[in-house]
Amino acid sequence: MLEIDWIDADWPSQVTDGYGAVRQPLSALFELSDEKGKPALIYVDENLDDEDAAEKHEAKLFGAEDLVIGSRFFRCFRIEAESVTDEAVRKEYLKKLPAFILLDPRGNEVARINGRTSARRLFSSMAKAYKASVGGNLKKSVGRIVKLLRDLEKAEDRMANAKRAHADATARLEKKRSARNAKRVKDKEKALEIARKEFEALRAKVDELARPRPAKKA
């Protein structure tokens, strides 16, 4: 099952001699990710004492396939609301929880949602950030990945079948050595290699589609 690849983080701050913790821009979170050039989704969760209720709420919100796949185009950071103790930050960003903040690759805020929301509304805000960042259409990009994922699943099935066929042919050869059985093993090896290359090529296409694109010039 696909899920959002969250990076657990704290609200960015820096300890300075004589001043204590000094608030940093949200773009400081980018240092936690190797995926440069992508916009960012920052999620500050709710202060929910009921863990089961929290998990159900998040499962419903982040269960939409297009939202999960769309998250591949973002650096996704998750911050626990309880860890944010700066009152100025809470007043400015966290008046209502959960909070969702979308940044472009340069760290500029593009959209913000406060309070519980739907997957559709969150995806719409992500699409806005994606368009502002790279000028692309997130819905179309997600659609291309969905199609490739379907093809990838089929290719994975074909590769699994090819592995079983090769294993069966190898077992038959070990049981009875013959030119015919040896040829069958070679044929199955070729079929397995073709299936493996097809699978790897499709997987590379999925990764390529989610690779950061050049940000729009300001």
Image: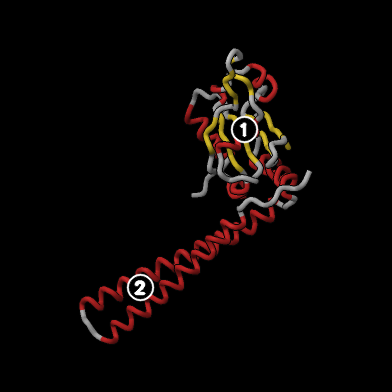
Q: Quadrant of residue 171?
A: bottom left
Point out residue 57 in the picture as x, y percentages from the top left corner.
55, 34
- Which residue is the site of mark 1? 28
Mark 2 and mark 1 in contact (Cβ < 8 Å)? Answer: no
Residue shown at the point (52%, 62%) measured from the top left: 152
Residue 124 place in picture, x, y as percent:
71, 43
Q: Is residue 30 visible?
A: yes
- Tell me: residue 152, above or below residue 26: below
Q: Which residue is mark 2?
A: 165
Residue occupying the point 60% across, 27% down? 12
The residue type indicated by label 1 comes to Ala
Q: Nearer the viewer, residue 195 or 124?
A: 195
**Relative to residue 135, is residue 19 depicted above or below?**
above
Residue closest to the far bottom:
179
Quarter of the figure with residue 183: bottom left
Q: Secondary structure at mark 1?
A: helix
